Image (cartoon, helix red, strand yellow):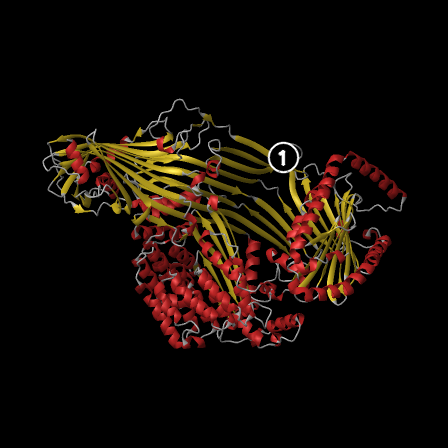
Amino acid sequence: MRAVVLALTVALVVPEFAPDKTYVYNYEALLLGGLPQEGLARAGIKLNSKVHLSAINENTFLMKLMDPLIHEYAGIWPKDPFVPATKLTSALAAQLQIPIKFEYANGVVGKVFAPAGVSPTVLNLHRGILNILQLNLKKTQNIYELQEDGAQGVCRTHYVISEDPKANHITVTKSKDLSHCQERIMKDVGLAYTERCAECTERIKSLIETATYNYIMKPASAGVLIAEATVQEVHQFSPFNEIHGAAQMEAKQTLAFVEIEKTPVVPINADYLARGSLQYEFATEILQTPIHLMKISDAPAQIIEVLKHLVENNVDMVHEDAPLKFVQLIQLLRFSTMENIEAIWAQFKDKPSGRRWLLDALPSVGTPVIVKFIKEKFLAGELTLPEFIQALVVALQMVTADLDTIQLTASLAMHEKIAKIPALREVVMLGYGSMIAKHCVAVPTCSAELLGPIHEIAAEATSKNNIPEITLALKVLGNAGHPASLKPIMKLLPGLRTAATSLPLSVQVDAILAMRNIAKKEPKLVQPVALQLVLDRALHPEVRMVACIVLFEAKPSVALVSSLAGALKTETNMHVVSFAYSHIKSLTRITAPDMAAVAGAANVAIKLMSRKLDRLSFRFSRALQWDFYHTPLMVGAAGSAYMINDAATILPRAVVAKTRAYLAGAAADVLEIGLRTEGIQEALLKSPAADESVDRITKIKRTLRALTNWKDLPNNQPLASAYIKLLGQEVAFVKIDKTIIEEAIPLATGPKPRQLLKAALKALQEGIALQYAKPLLAAEVRRILPTAVGVPMELSLYTAAVAAARVNVQATITPPLPEEIETMTLEQLKKTDVQLQAEARPSIALQTFAVMGVNTALIQAAVMARGKIRTITPGKVTARADILKGNYKVEALPSLYSCSDSFETLAVVRNIEEPTAERTVPLVPELAVQNSQTPADYLSSENPDEVPVRAPAPFDKTLCLAVPYIEIKGCVELHSHNAAFIRNAPLFYIIGQHSARTVVLAVAEGPAVERLELEVQVGPRAAERLLKQISLIDEETPEGKAFLLKLREILETEDKNRPVSSESSSSRSSSSSSSSSSMSSSRVTKVRTRNIMFSLDQTLMFITLFCLQYLAPHGASKKVSSGSSASSFQRIQKQAKFLGNAVPPVFAVIARAVRVDHKLLGYQLAAYFDKPTARVQLVVTSIAENDNQKICMDGALLSKHKVTAKLAWGPECQQYAVTAKAEAGVLGEFPAARLELEWERLPITVTTYAKKLSKHIPMAAFQAGFRLERVMNSEKEIELTAALPNQRSLNVIARIPEVKHNIHANNQQVNSENWRTKVSNILIYSKYLK
């Protein structure tokens, strides 16, 4: 026997089954999902059966399952047992026991045959067994690797063959890396517009899949017999780095030989149809949502039932489970035929509520039937234009992009009814391009013929010089992003074809932008084209800058970026230089993994360019990019902004802003907005505003004058255009021209607005009652993967929301308005008394589900994270406007607000035969026990000696805050119980149960509040409306002196009771911080001295000019000017301490709570204005008895360039005070401005936090480019002075207690990293600035 084994090792033969025998095996398949740690809940299924195998002929075999039994599991692993799914087993027993045929030769499974009565789901279970028999054994190698076909696709497989002479058998180990497959069987939903970030997952992955097969093979009379085969497959997923913990789906199979029988397997009397190969066949799980399992017996009746539930239970407020019901409605519609939907539409199309719900649900169904239905109903006139646009835009993004749907969309775009409405045709055409893009993601070998109609449209429009049609075709090609479109696009690029130079600039720009999505797929094709456009100096600067955007989005190599940097050294157009340099400079700071190579190339290129380019101001074109990427969590965000300016005008030619997001190894361009002002630019260039010899102020005035003369603008081109992109796809664009403006003006000034106003006022008087509900399927992201067992697992994310509101509005107008409102005069309007009553009850419910587990039409077993948010905000408001008396009043009932949030993780199992017997277990039980077993041993190990770790008690807390006067309080109830006791990682903090409930309600104790009032009285009657007489104590009177003496005693007592240790500690800390900051500044100054020499002449010139014309006069006159300002303001105040004694209030505002005991509670504000002294005074007082707290704001315009204001508060406005002074003028020849803040006394809270903040000021100021030095500044004063020596420079001096900061910088330096370099040449001299 040993000789036989050795011979088999050298020349191994494949497993064989004798034709006259039936081989009996015991088979067990287990699929469990959850976290690998024990003591937590899991969900899964198990299948036990006997497998009979017998040969029909040499290469054809029969397989039959005997005594199958399905178990389901949802419990705490491993203590809870599996539960037999008796009803499900009985329902499937007949199918499961039907023999299937399969081809098998040399260890490779070929075609599979089964009767039509065997469902795809059951047949996939058979494929799971056949997958074990798949063995590609080589006779000459014991260790080898190949791409092997299997149930999950063609994947990398590693074989190791060894012998065990003592046991007389051969061991074959086969391991599969399911992450590296030539052809992977999977279905993605909602991921068509995302990009795979390969660089993000090079070192760490969010999804890891592997499988290991172990075979024990023994010699037999017919060859080799598989004595035992075990399979272990793991799918590990985490939204974060897997190092921080991950959820797992583990599949385990065992096939053990039992005996050989003589009774053959007999096929049933039915036709055996070819049902594909070993590869998994998708069934109805694509239409089946994993968050609930529905037994669909009568789809139309069930749809009507759900629709009625949604309509009836979301009237006054949204139902808690409305989002889940909305998802159920979508699922039922997915299983419906065209005839079913037609019948339901006929029943609800004339019922407004049901019609709205149906039209909101249909686009999210995502089946070709829905697109066809929407098209037919619009062409039949049963849908309004807004309904059609809304439904079509969503449907085209949700529908599966197959060839039939693409053809349907193309026919819709070419329909004559659509063609008559340009805006509608644009929407359909853009959707057509997006459909092709989605199809090419699913089918990478998609044919270029799909874009044939668009190419023909572009060619015809070019020949006829039809600019709008060319633009639309380019945008469609840009959405499609097919490499085959590059040639037609290049025909419209300037510089590459002579015909393109005659096209408008906007078309040239659109042609370049159309290459962006192509660059993501084939960057090598786009890079040379974009670089050639950037370097072509004969082209318009805007064209070159847009080409620069495309070039860097194509991720150029270091050679290309260096070539661009070298060419910019001799570039004469400063806008192109500034744009390219700022783009390269911003890319050097990018940290996103997919841009790492570009960032490295930019770092090389930036060293080849002159640092003088940092001095270019924001008047030149700019590109800015920023990003954030956190590698441990695999999340990030990026943003970019492009501003293309024109040398002749102050308006930018184009502005583009884009955001990008990274999550779990995927990336997506979330939102992009672009704006161009091409027509306006052309008009401005022909206006006097383009004169370069005038100053900027004059240029602004001329620009505004040119814009007001819009009638002189050209007719043949757009004045401005804008577009918006979602997930990299352009969904809408608009072009504004003179014709649109001319058509819009009559709509705004003609009779139609008056008719609308008349109708609105009439409706208000009659009363308006609205009920509105809006559902939304905000997210549906799914990835469906087959497992070794033959059962699909799914990773999915669903988010659905429903908003509902009921609004009642009633208006009473006295006297009634005339029939012809346009005849109403202003005097009549002033005598009108309008009273408006409104009641609203808006509410929102949102539910989010994240699922990992088994999802079939027969059984679901998954771990699920479920989040819920529900918000209710009722409100009742009464408003009254008496225009004649100048009285405006708003009354509101205290609203009761509630918001409940919950998040929980569960293990759920349910089957179609017992839909009401769903078993749900919290993933983290209250008394969870965790031991230290490894994930590899958790299915079978027993370690009773392990020390258990008991979970801590859940966190529960309630916080309440009462609002004074209005007698309401807000409470927040918090509950949290997670698995962080197992591991200190983000995932373990998330799983568990968390909830928060916020409630605002009336206080049970004390008098109830009837209503809240806000009243405004304008004019001479303002004094009459004040509920409490306002007066301010005069310090010169005996009463005033006595009050101030008493207040001073109180404040001195407070000062004595302050903790001294904290102040002294703060002082020492501040001193130490300042000292270290000074030393640091000194050290850095030495380093910066080396950077000064390159601009020494400019520095000396500025120092001389600045010191002579600014420092000397300013230093001498500061105290005089400031003192003069203060004295003049004090003199005005002494003339009248309180303006209310001399002039009536201009207006009064009263805010109060009306209680049942009629006690006055609230505040009132009175505003006074003294025209001779240009003085304004605002006084806020409490209307409660014995409450002398006041807030006084007093300001005066001392001259055209000087203003002073004082804010005081406390008892009689005497406790705290802050004075602000602002003035503008010139310092020497330079325009300048100064702001001063002085205070007499501040609350201890303010001073405490100010001292803490002051510790960070030296470092923050130093990093921003300020030079710090010690001077004797006032302890209670802050001063900020800014001067403009020229258009490119800004000098700033900031004086704060104990520290003075000086800065001189070019006005364009917003980037703090460049700021410090720029200011080093002047800050070294800041010691003179005193």
Going 44% across and 75% down the picture, which residue do you hit? Answer: 503
**Neighbour tally class for label 1: few under 14, some 14-19, many 20 plus, Cα within 10 Å:** some
Q: Is residue 741 visible?
A: yes
Q: Secondary structure at mark 1?
A: loop
Q: Quadrant of the C terminus?
A: bottom right
Can residue 291 be seen here? The reply is no
**Left or right relative to 1288: residue 303:** left
Location of residue 1033 (image quadrant): top right
Q: What is the quadrant of residue 764 in the picture?
A: bottom right
Place of residue 425 in the rendered image (x, y in percent of width and height, measured from the top left): 40, 65
Depth order, front residue of 931/655 = 931
Q: Which residue is mark 1?
A: 1003
Residue 472 is situated, as x and y percent measured from the top left of the image, at 41, 67
In percent of the image, x 35 and y 38: which residue is there?
249
- In the drawing, does residue 1231 fall left or right of residue 510? right
Question: How many numbered discs?
Answer: 1
* Residue at (39% x, 37% y) in the render: 863
User: Is 355 placed above or below 215 here?
Assistant: below
The residue nearer to you, when weighing 1031 against 978, is: 978
